[in-house]
Image (spheres, rainbow, N blue to C red):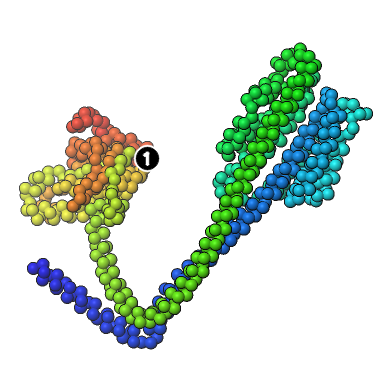
Amino acid sequence: MSLKVSFKNSLKLSSAVVEPELDMHSIVKDQGGKTKQIFRMLMVLFAPVTVLLIMCGLQLKASVNQKREISSGFSKMKDALLAAKFAVNCREEGLLAGILLSEFHSERSSFYSIFNNYTEKTDGALNEFYNYGLLRVEADTILATLSEIKDHLKQMRSHIKDFGDSGPENSNFEKVLTLYYTFHKSIMDSGAFHLVLPSKEDIWSKMVAFMALERAASAIQLKMSLGFTYFLPCSIEMMRKHWYISESATGETYLNLASVSYEEVSILLKTLPMEARESIMKMSMAVEHSHHLEMCKMSSINMREMNRKYWYSNMSIFISNIDLTRQKVGDAILGSLEILDEEASNSLKLNIGIMIAVTTACVILSLWYVSCVSSMTTKVVRYALHVSKKTHEVEEEKNRADKLLYQMLPKSVAELLKQQRKVHAEFYDCVSIYFSDIVSFTTLSAKSSPNEIIDLLNSLYGLFDSCIDSFNVYKVETIGDAYMVVSGIPKKIEHHAVEIANMALKLLKSVENFSIPHLPDETLKLRIGLHSGPCAAGVVGNKMPRYCLFGDTVNTASRMESSGEPLKVHISQSTYSLLRPTGNFQMVYRGLIPIKGKGDMKTYWLHEKTA
């Protein structure tokens, strides 16, 4: 029998397809229709070919831009290293100027000679540093040319004279330090350091470390100059002390930033001898804290001079260590850029080769496709018509199957099962569950035939199903005369108790006018129970999967229904607690009711909605 049915079905399917194919044959004979179809088929080829060529062109353009960007970054990084070299010379010249102007310096003549020699070194670094952009040394002073920078340097150096005739009281220590270190900061803020580097995390982290190390060295060198004035007189002015502490903190901050940005920095900085590190720490404490003052004053002049030399020597080693680390970080940046530049060159060559190969292949493929497309058009159109018809039939069958599936399972769960994905059981913190049954259903069944019972339940549940569509609820199942609904599953909502309460009142009202056709003298009475609480839900079964609820909340909701009364809505304390804050429901305390498996529970009657 099954073979005959299959055969008949195949015959029907064949006859349904023959007629459209004959119609299509006449369409293909029409020259206008054929030309139109050929044009469409050609567009199918030319559109992706055009997109492919555009993509290859964009990729080639991106490679060219990347190569240009990296080459530009490499060149500008070299400029930045030259700028840093000039900045370091200015910084060290400022250190010598500060020491030279120290009120208690006993070797000015030798330092003055060193200072004059060092200015030549600074001028030489300036001549190499040509790509400086604009230097803003003051709010209203901007240096834009090489001659203006040289004039500014000359003006700063004019504050340092031959101290053979002038005494310490004529020195301007703070002003000179401020001039030099403001000038150094303007170099670090200049256009030479406004780099456009490739967006690689390791390069930018190294660049941050590079800048932080130079700023740390500047702050620590300024701290060195200020600390130099302390050791001989064993005192320091309050303003200088505050300045000293500020620069000390700034230097430490920038060193920490450099270490965090690039791990190699902390390793390189540890090469400073431990003895020098401990000496710097002790001497810094002496400057910052006044309780070292008496000890300093009790020492001899020779000891103070020795301490000052130790301070100068150890701090010089420390700063040299920072500068060496900064140079190594700069070399590491150049090395990374060289690697990126080589990779960009290889990528550019590869993309050029791909562009040539793709263009050649596209031309050959287009010529072959144009020669074949005319003969293929008729077959393609016929097949497309056949597929379209079958697709429409499959779509209709799919829609019918979906409607049936959505009646058995929640839509979200059904979609997962259709995709052959596993539906995991889910736990819900709080949901509201509805149970109801028909009072004296056994007696009604005894007075009715099986068909009459089925008709009765179909009519009743049809009424219920049309009512619950107005609420954010999901009908879990019906077993005989029992009707189970939940709100808050599978879609979580906060007002689930309100939804289930409104639904229960509407269902209770809907059965008031419900009549039993074969028993007109009998009145249908519902008994309803509601409970809210945590619950688990999941799909059970393979051949006939069902969406089931698990947990004590389900049992308690069932107990609320079984311990209720006809034509009343019996609710638990938890549901009452969720409804009471709304102020929209009239609820009456029923009392402590013994519930099987739960003991005595406070329960309430839900009478009506007040608002």
The image quadrant of residue 233 is: top right
Which quarter of the figure is the N terminus placed in? Answer: bottom left
- Seen in the image, is 12 located left or right of residue 472? left
Q: Residue at x 85, y 45 (%)?
A: 151
- Label 1, secondary structure: give it: helix
- Seen in the image, is 101 located left or right of residue 252? right
Residue 193 visible, this angle: yes
In the displayed structure, would residue 479 be above or below residue 359? above
Which quarter of the figure is the C terminus placed in? Answer: top left
Q: 585 or 188: which is nearer to us?
A: 188
Percent of width and height locating residue 41: 40, 77
Q: Residue at x 73, y 39 (%)?
A: 88
Q: In the rendered picture of this protein, how many numbered marks are placed on residues?
A: 1
User: Would you name the residue on which mark 1 appears?
Assistant: 582
Residue 182 visible, this angle: no
The image quadrant of residue 591 is: top left
- Seen in the image, is 2 located left or right of residue 468? left
Percent of width and height locating residue 112: 85, 32
Percent of width and height locating residue 111: 83, 30
Residue type for callout 1: Thr
In the displayed structure, would residue 322 be above or below residue 447? above
Q: 145 or 308: which is nearer to us?
A: 308
Q: Residue at x 73, y 14 (%)?
A: 295
Q: Residues within 10 Å of mark 1 (few under 14, many from 20)?
A: few
Which residue ends up furthest to the top in the rendered image? Answer: 298
In the displayed structure, would residue 53 be above or below residue 162? below
In the displayed structure, would residue 265 be above or below residue 409? above
Which residue ends up furthest to the right in the rendered image? Answer: 165
Q: Residue at x 52, y 63 (%)?
A: 351
Percent of width and height locating residue 313: 73, 27
